[in-house]
Amino acid sequence: MLFEEFGFDNRILKAIGHLGFDEATEIQARAIPEAMAGRDLLASSKTGSGKTLAYLLPALHRVYKKKALSKRDPRVVVLVPTRELAKQVYGQLRLLLASSRFTSILIQGGENFNDQHKLLQKDPHFIVATPGRLVDHLKQRHLFLDGLELLILDEADRMLDLGFAEAMRAINVAASHRQRQTLFFSATLDNTEVSGIASELLREPSRVAIGQGFDEHTDITQHVLLCDHLDHKEALLKHILVGQTIKQAIVFTATKSDTVRLSEIVAGWGLSTQALNGNLSQSARNKTMDSFARGQFDVLVSTDVASRGLDIASVSHVFNFDLPKQAEEFVHRTGRTGRAGFKGDAYSLVGPKDWVNFKAVEAFLQKTFSTEVVEGLEPKFKGLAPPKPAVQANKKTNVKEQSRAPKKSSKKTQGKARFHDGQQKDGFEAFKLPPKRFDDKNDMGDED
Ligand code: ADP
Ligand code: MG
């Protein structure tokens, strides 16, 4: 479907023209007409499929075409989970609003509260925000949402993961009047937490789900390399980073401290690199992202803080130096490449410590990856043995029952992980692995 065919205001068509797009992506073609018709919308599609414009364009159309409900209150609020994504969405919005009289601001954690208050006093039409900080301002009565016309939630599942459910509810309540329209985007729609909050926030929504949200991404080639230990991982990373034509790469690690350590190693190979993690000040994070987006360095070594939403077309390679703890995160990380029609390569380095997480990714994607080998860097590790059939000792025991309720005190079950399907994998070697490498609990958390 061509953008001309939606019936957009001419000023919007002009702005799209500046972006150089003629044809809508599938999610845009399906979501935009629903949103323009004023309906609430529940939508999902794969990463890089153009969701941002799918909600920004109808938002723009609405403010151009309709009279504001209030002179002072924001007309459109876009909620996003992370500061990085907030900045990116705000950037797109600014481009679209460039030659209009409408104003927009960015409200995110980690930046000066009073400066944000001053911006809010100017009564902007659009606000792009992370939920926590916006609620702080609501509590201080720095803004009101009685006149809000359109509430947009981008990456709603991620906002829930980050513990923003209460903030989302508070914003919903502050803007709960009849005319409000809500657009809800999430990578997953079929999880109880997501559908729960969606049913609180949305009224008789249209549902647009393109694929499962996790359809195979044909522009991304997945490579899996088995590794024996840390040195082996580093050697493989070096082999690929130094040996292949890389435009830009993102390397994901499990911990914040690893981003720094690994980035120093990568620098030692003569590549330009920086580390990104939630320990950095907001301005340092912004600076790193900006210069990466401008191509000023080649390799970003990051925690999952960069796994969602970031859209940099020249990212040709993504590395899971460590497999993510949450299988879903795999999709978001690897979705940083293969964007906007470009091809991308995603490498997962799977060592003994990653095995359980790797299997969880396969289970999640319902897919079995084949592994590749680099000549001269062949692994000894061949994966861990699949579980033996559970419960030999007592034949009478119902296997299913027992697996659901392992005796907590039993020595046998101690330290054994449980899998998604609730099955306990008896005799599975993974459970003999040393404790995870995380320095401490705080080393994982990354958000506002
Ligand atoms: P998502 O939120 O679904 O992950 P984005 O909204 O970040 O995806 O868009 C991914 C990339 O595709 C961006 O670079 C965006 O500018 C580009 N894009 C969006 N819509 C179109 C379109 N209709 N035609 C071509 N490229 C597009
Ligand atoms: Mg997005």
Image (spheres, rainbow, N blue to C red):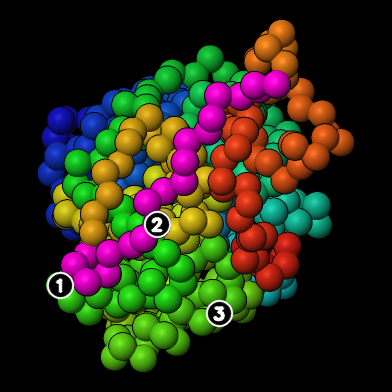
> In which image quadrant can residue 6 be found?
top left
Taken as a whole, is the magenta stretch helix, strand or loop?
A: loop
* Residue 200 percent location from the top left of the image: 66, 24
Q: Nearer the viewer, residue 134 or 62?
A: 134
At x 37%, y 88%, the residue is 267
Quarter of the image with the C terminus in it: bottom right
**The residue tagged with tag 1: helix, strand or loop?**
loop
Q: Is residue 36 left or right of residue 80?
A: left
Q: Which residue is mark 1?
A: 245
- The mark found on residue 283 in the picture is 3
**Marks 3 and 1: in contact by CB < 8 Å?**
no
> In which image quadrant can residue 395 be found?
top right
Q: Earlier in the sequence, mark 1 or mark 3?
A: 1
**The residue tagged with tag 2: helix, strand or loop?**
loop
Give the Cα distance between marks 3 and 2: 42 Å
Q: Residues within 10 Å of mark 1 (few under 14, many from 20)?
A: few
* Residue 274 percent location from the top left of the image: 42, 81
Query: Quick check: can you spot residue 314?
Result: no
Given the image, on which type of amino acid does mark 2 rest?
Answer: Phe
Give the Cα distance between marks 1 and 3: 31 Å
Q: Is residue 123 left or right of residue 35?
A: right
**Marks 2 and 3: in contact by CB < 8 Å?**
no
Q: Which residues are magenta?
A: 374-393
Give the Cα distance between marks 1 and 2: 28 Å
Q: Which residue is mark 2?
A: 381
Look at the picture and state if 235 lies above or below 26. below
